[in-house]
Amino acid sequence: MRKYWLLFAQATTIGLAILFVVLTLKPSLLPHSARTGGIVTLHEDATDEGGKLPSAGFSEAAKRVMPAVVNIYTSTEIKVNPMQNDPRFRFFFGDQMDEGATQRSSSLGSGVIVSNDGYILTNHHVVEAADQIEVALADGRTAKARTIGSDPETDLAVIKIELPGTLPAVTFGHSDQAHVGDIVLAIGNPFGVGQTVTMGIVSALKRNHLGLSTFENFIQTDAAINPGNSGGALADAEGNLIGINSAIYSPNGGSLGIGFAIPVSTAKKIMEQIIQNGSVTRGWIGVAVQEISPELAESFKLPNSQGVLISEVVRGGPAEQAGVKPGDILVAVGEQELTDSSSMLETIASLAPGKVATLKLLRNQTEVAAQVKIGKRPAPKPQN
C-alpha cells in the first residue's frame, strides 16, 4: 500500500510541475477553464520588433504640406504722434520719444510656397503697408521677402524670397471638388508659437456676404484658425492645398470653430495675374446693385427673386453709355444668369476690359437688351 501511495505522490508532483511550466510559458495551450485568475491575455500589435509601424491619422498628409508653409514676420515704421511735443501731452505721458522720431510696429502671419523658385502666397492684410518682410521656413532658414503684388478685394498677396537650391512647393488640390464633411488640416503659425497643425472638417462652402472682402467665396471650417494663421494652408486629407486661411469669426480673437479660407480655385487665378502683371485686372460696368428680396419681387411684380436691382448708375460709366437706368433688373450677362449680387460681381469682374457683353434687363416688366463695353474696375481706395 505504501508503494502505491509513493507512486501516486510522485506522479502528482510531476503533473503539477508540468502544469506550472505550461501555465508560465505557454498558457494558450490550456483550455480557458484551466487558466488561473490574474493572467490576462492582451491583444498586442503583431508587428515584428524593428518593423515599420502602420501609419495612423493624417501624419503623411501633414508631412507633405508642412515644409511649404512658412512663417511671415512684418514690421512697419510709424511716425511718432506730433502731439508728443505738446507740454500737456508730455505732462500726462512723459518724454517718451523725441519729436520726429519713429518706432516700428511688428506683426506675424503665415504663407505658402507655391513654386520652387520662391513665390509665396499669403493674405493681403498680412503684408499690407509692411516696410520689411522676413520669412522663416520650416527647415529653419530665413530670408528677406519682397512684395510682388497684392489684391485687397480678395485679401490675397504674392511675395518672393531668394534662397539657394530648390524650395519645397505645395501641391495644389481641387477646392471645387470639396464637400461638406471632408477632413481638412489648417497649418500656420498661431500666436507666434511656431508651425502648428490643426484638424477639422469642411463646415460649409461658398460662404459670402460676410463683409470680409469684396469678392467672397469662402470655405468654412472648424479646424482651429487663430491670429498668425492668416495666409497659411488649408489642406485636404491627402496633403493638397485647397484653401488659404484668411479669417475667423470670434469676438475675443480666439478660435470658436468658425474659420474661413479662400479656395485655391480663386487664389490660383489671382496669383497668376499678380505674378504676370503685378496686379489684378477686372471688368466693370459702373453700377451699384441691391439684392431682390421677396418684398421687392412682389413690388416689381417679378416671378421670382432672380437677378439684382440696379440702384445707381455711375455717370459716364459703361452702363450709362449702354442705356442702363436705375430701377432696371439685371437678370443675365450674356448667357450667364444671375442669382444675386455676388454672382453678378464675379461674372462682370471675370470679363476682360474692352469686351462687349449683352446685358439682359427687365424694365417695367419688359425684357430689354443692352450692349455694354466692359471697362476696367477702379482700384479700391485705401482704408485709413
Image: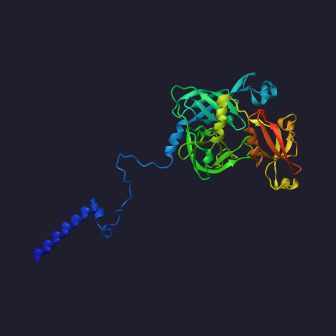
Taking the image as drawn, is residue 122 in sight?
A: yes
Q: Residue at x 70, y 38 (%)?
A: 154
The image quadrant of residue 234 is top right
**Near-viewer residue (127 or 25):** 127
> Which quadrant of the rendered structure holds the C terminus?
top right
Instruction: Say whether residue 119 is left or right of residue 314.
Output: left
Instruction: Say whether residue 381 is left or right of residue 32.
Output: right
**Near-viewer residue (306 or 110):** 306
374 shown above or below 34 = above
The spot of residue 94 in percent (x, y) is: 75, 28
Residue lying furthest right in this view? 364
> Which quadrant of the rendered structure holds the N terminus?
bottom left
Q: What colour scheme governs how the chains and residues are painted in the rendered image of this protein?
A: rainbow
The spot of residue 292 in percent (x, y) is: 82, 51
The image quadrant of residue 377 is top right
Q: Residue at x 54, y 31 (%)?
A: 116
Instruction: Say whether residue 194 is left or right of residue 253.
Output: left
306 shown above or below 247 = below
Taking the image as drawn, is residue 75 in sight?
A: no
Instruction: Say whether residue 279 is left or right of residue 119.
Output: right
**Near-viewer residue (102 or 32):** 32
271 shown above or below 253 = above
Q: Residue at x 16, y 71 (%)?
A: 9
93 shown above or below 214 = above
The spot of residue 383 in percent (x, y) is: 77, 34
Instruction: Give the mark count.
Output: 0
